[in-house]
Amino acid sequence: QLQLVEFGGGLVQSGGSLTLSCVMSGAVSNYNTIGWFRQAPGKEREGISCTSRGGLSKYVDSVKGRFQVSRNNAKNTVYLHMNSLNSEDTAVYFCAASEAQWNGDSCFEAMSYKWWGQGAQVTISS
């Protein structure tokens, strides 16, 4: 049973930066797709980023150019680097993993992932 734990959430001023870490109990390279999702208060969970084992990445338009995913296979960790944060980025952020073959058309869909972290709260203050 794979376990994922997010670290690095917190309170950041508008315009600031924050990096979330997703530490996995298994090797990152074993999972074809790693996704990042977020859920703002009163809203549905939305996929914001997905990355394949081979290095392909997709970002939702609202974070494109501001967020970037990287991974450290030796530490079994995937990172979400977030810049130019604003109040609309306030949410609980989740990482998720899938063994299924990469599919860029569905990687923003929560049902594509089998394993999930517990979430990390990110709050942006104005």
Image: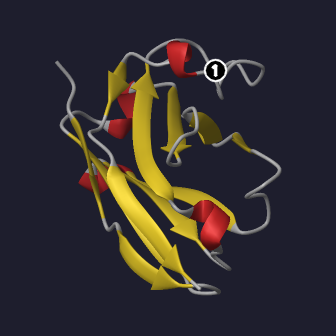
Q: Residue 89, image x and y in percent?
A: 60, 62
Q: Residue at x 33, y 30 (%)?
A: 116
Question: Quarter holding the N terminus?
Answer: top left
Q: Is residue 126 above or below residue 107?
A: below
Judge from the rendering whether residue 20 lies leftward or rightward of residue 76; answer left or right: right
Q: Amino acid at mark 1?
A: Trp
Q: Is residue 47 above or below residue 111?
A: below
Question: Quarter holding the C terminus?
Answer: bottom right
Q: Residue 79, image x and y in percent?
A: 44, 59
**In this figure, which residue is indicated by the disc labeled 1?**
102
**Quadrant hosting residue 75:** bottom left
Q: Residue 40, image x and y in percent?
A: 53, 48
Is residue 47 visible in the rendered image? The answer is yes
Q: Residue at x 65, y 86 (%)?
A: 15
Q: Secondary structure at mark 1?
A: loop
Residue lying at the far right in this picture: please name it. 61
Residue nearest the observer in this picture, 59 or 73: 59
Is residue 54 visible in the rendered image? The answer is no
Judge from the rendering whether residue 45 lies leftward or rightward of residue 19; answer left or right: right
How many marks do you count on the picture? 1
Residue nearest the observer in this picture, 49 or 62: 62
Q: Residue at x 61, y 36 (%)?
A: 46
**Quadrant hosting residue 103:** top right
